[in-house]
Amino acid sequence: MIDNLTPREQEVLALILDEKSSSVIAKQLGISERTVETYRKNIYSKAGVKTVVGLVKHVYEEKLKN
C-alpha cells in the first residue's frame, strides 16, 4: 500500500476504505473531525491523489502489483 503512513494514518485509511465518513471515524477513534480531515489530507498527499476515488484506485492498483 502506501509505504510511509503512520500507524494512525493506516487506521484512518482502513476506515476510509470501509466507507466511513470523517464524523464516524472521529467518533470511533475518539478524535475530532478536524483531526480526521488532517489525517485524510496527509494520506492523500502521500498517495499522490486528490480524492477518495483516487485513493481507492491507488490502493487497488497497489494490491494488484503484490
Image (cartoon, rainbow, N blue to C red):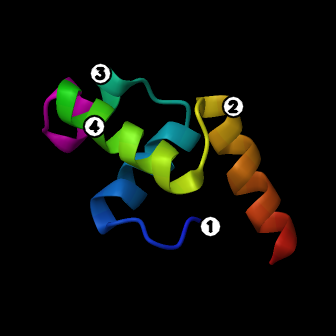
First of labels 4, 3 by sequence position: 3
**What residue sits 35% from the left and 26% below the top?**
22
Q: Position of residue 50 (x, y in %)?
A: 58, 33
Sequence-wise first label, 1 or 4: 1
| Apparent side of residue 63 relative to residue 35 in the rendered image (left or right) | right
Marks 3, 2: nearer the viewer: 2
**Camera-nearest label, 4 or 3:** 4
| Label 1 sits on residue | 1
Q: Which mark is first along the chain, 3 or 1?
A: 1
Element carrying mark 4: helix
Q: Can you identify the residue that label 4 sits on?
A: 38
Between the residue at mark 1 and the residue at mark 3, the CA separation in whole angstroms equals 24 Å
Q: Amino acid at mark 3?
A: Ser
Q: Are marks 3 and 2 in contact (CB under 8 Å)?
A: no
Q: CA distance from mark 2 to mark 4?
A: 18 Å
- Count residues near mark 4 (Cα–Cα under 10 Å), then give few for <14, some for 14-19, many for 20+: few
**Depth check: 12 or 42 in front?**
42
The amino acid marked with disc number 2 is Val
Query: What range is drawn magenta here?
Result: 26-33
Q: Earlier in the sequence, mark 2 or mark 4?
A: 4
The image position of residue 20, as x and y in percent, is: 46, 29
Residue 64 belongs to the span the image colors magenta: no
Give left or right: position of 43 versus 30.
Answer: right
Within-10-Å neighbours for mark 2: few <14, some 14–19, many 20+: few
Question: What residue sits right under mark 2 in the picture?
Answer: 53
Q: Nearer the viewer, mark 1 or mark 4?
A: 4
Whole-angstrom CA distance, mark 1 to mark 4, is: 19 Å
Q: Residue at 60% of width from left, 29% of height from top?
A: 51
Label 1 element class: loop
If the image is split into quadrants, where does the C terminus sit? bottom right
